[in-house]
Image (tube, helix red, strand yellow):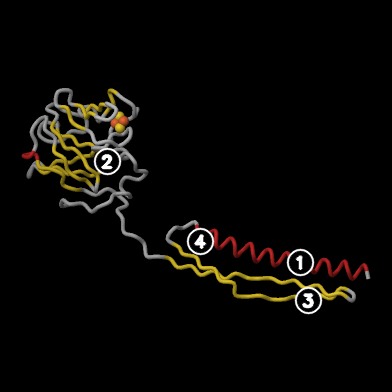
Amino acid sequence: MSKDKGVDSNRRAVIIGGAAAIAGIAAGIVIGGNAFPRTTVEEKPITSSIVKEEIGTSTTTVTQTVTSTTSTTAPPVSVPVAYVRQKVANYSQLQVGTPITTNYMGYTVYIVRTGVPSVGGVGPNGDVVGYSAYCAHMGYILEYDPNTRCMLCPQHFSQYDATAGGMQVVGHPNQFLPQLILEYDESTGDIYAVGFNRLVYGTYNTAAQASSSPMGES
Ligand code: FES
């Protein structure tokens, strides 16, 4: 009798272990599906089976339930994954000290002639530069001061030198202002942006998080 009980106990352990393993696999599928936001996982119990094993004159019943999962993957959302080449100004529009406000891939930017050759500058005098309009500290909209050639933040008074690649000269962020990488077509005077050199405030992937299509020709 004790030998039979030993054998049956092992069988029962195997059965219970099998049921646990099946449940674990099903749970793993569900967890894996939820890790991808575009996948919808639908659970539906579909199987209930009963296993009986005789132990002497008694009967042991083990019930296991298998959960079926159905995954539906939504079509991918089309977003830019890289910077694009976009016209942001023409040289004839620009006057020293007076920035123009425009849009690059959904981000507000300033294009300005500083009046002196500047880091990253393009154009006949190398003084056309472009910057994100959002302060690197907390994202407030900046203003350009032609006297200091700095981008000024009216919120907490940080300043970024527009002639020095957006180097912070006063304030909180301890980082450069993201600068537009510009190209100049001397045959037409058109100025193109081809990307930012740093992450724009509030983004972890500035290109992929762009909210609109480019408006200029490429
Ligand atoms: S938001 Fe510009 S310094 Fe704080």
- The structure residue drawn at horizontal position 79% and vertical position 68%, both measured from the top left corner, is 12
Q: In this view, which residue lies farthest toward the front? A: 155
Q: Which sits earlier in the primary sequence, circle 3 or circle 1? A: 1
Ligand 1 has an atom within 8 Å of the beta carbon of the residue at disc 2:
no
Tell me where residue 160 sits by quadrant. top left
Residue that carries the numbered disc 2 in the rendered image: 196
Residue drawn at x 23%, y 44% as measured from the top left: 194
Asked whether the viewer can see residue 1, the reply is: yes
For ligand 1, tell me if the residue under mark 3 lies within 8 Å. Answer: no
* Marks 4, 2: nearer the viewer: 4
In depth, the one of 125 and 146 nearer the eye is 146
List the residue tagged with mark 1.
Answer: 14
What residue is shown with label 3? 52
| Mark 1 CB lies closer than 8 A to ligand 1 | no
Callout 3: few (<14), some (14-19), or many (20+) C-alpha neighbours within 10 Å? Answer: few
The kind of residue tagged 4 is Gly
Vertical side of 205 occupied by 61: above or below = below
**N-terminal-most mark, 3 or 4:** 4
Which image quarter has ligand 1? top left
Characterize the local packing of mark 2: few (<14), some (14-19) or many (20 or more) Cα atoms within 10 angstroms: many
Q: Which mark is residue 38?
A: none
The crowding category of the residue bearing disc 1, from other C-alpha atoms within 10 Å (few below 14, some 14 to 19, many at least 20), is: few
Dots 2 and 1: beta carbons under 8 Å?
no
Of the two numbered discs 3 and 1 in the rendering, the one whose residue sits closer to the viewer:
3
Q: Give the label on residue 33, or none.
A: 4
